[in-house]
Amino acid sequence: MSQDISAIRRALVRVPSDLKLGNFIAAARNLRGAASAMIRIPMMKAEQEEFARLIDEGASHMAYNKEISRLFPLAISYTQGFEQVLVDTLDELIAALEAKAGEEGREALRLLEEKKRASLQKGKDELDRGEHDEARSTFNALTKEFEGDGELASTVGDVFLQAGLFEDALRHFEHASGVMPESAAVYNRIGISFRKLGRHNKSRENFEKALTLEPGDPNLHFNLGRLYLDMQDWNACLDSAETALKLDPAFAEAAKLAAYCKKKLG
């Protein structure tokens, strides 16, 4: 029990500093915890007096905090013996603070998404104008700022892939694979990039990685078949095309690929 009281006291003493740092929810929770302790934990008279003094000081700091006053219209005050009144008031304050934090978090996320979209569009526009170095700088800064966002890195890779800048695409796809090592889609894109660069073994290696993750994806089998087409390995190409067709009988491109391989095989 004494350990509980010591921990609650330490938290209570932090209330003024938490308020100065803007940690309003932590301050309110610590003050509430102390008021609740006065109700539920038997204390010696000296402990009660110390807690009452510290709670009163904490409530005063909170009542005179301008940020809290703007958000929360109810009076925050403490009278010894009426701890439950303070607990109830702090419950309402904590709910208001958490709601505000949620709104601020959503707004922050919205602003980040807007920043990503703006930077993506800026880089695309630079590529459209043939300003490749400028686009590289824009996209590098973007993926560095959001280096943990694998989907963003993959999107940037797609932009470079569509622009025919395969080395750049490959670099961003490999970044994405480091963040999302279980993404078959990323390994598929790496395989496509290596195929475009004529690096057949690396391309096959990544298509096979993708297939270990998504063996039932007909598009992956078709893409591997396209690689074997480039390599003029007609038997392997036909196997991949026919596997894609088994998985998706309506896959027209796979049917064309299979027919071409059969023609080559005589």
Image (cartoon, helix red, strand yellow):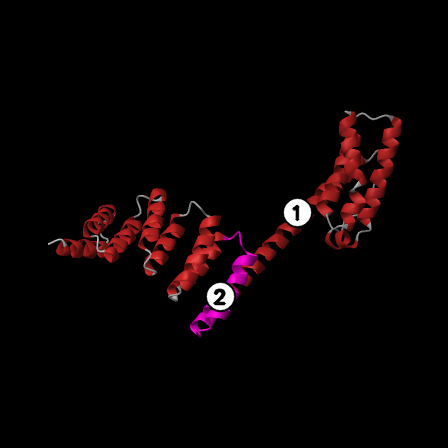
Q: Amino acid at mark 2?
A: Arg
Check residue 136 in the rendering and tell me which mark sits there, or answer none: 2
Check residue 98 in the rendering and tell me which mark sits there, or answer none: 1
Q: Quadrant of the N terminus?
A: top right
- Left or right, residue 158 beside residue 90: left
Q: Residue at x 80, y 25 (%)?
A: 42
Above/below status of 230 relative to 9: below
The magenta stretch spans which residues?
120-149
The one nearer the camera, 33 or 186, is: 186
- Tell me if label 1 and label 2 are in contact, CB under 8 Å: no
Q: Residue at x 43, y 62 (%)?
A: 168
The one nearer the camera, 122 or 88, is: 122
Earlier in the chain: of badge 1 and badge 2, it is: 1
Magenta stretch, overall SS: helix
Give neighbour class at mark 2: few <14, some 14-19, many 20+ (Cα, 10 Å). Answer: some
Q: Amino acid at mark 1?
A: Glu
- Left or right, residue 232 beside residue 211: left
- Left or right, residue 83 beside residue 239: right
Relative image position of residue 157 (x, y in whole percent): 43, 59
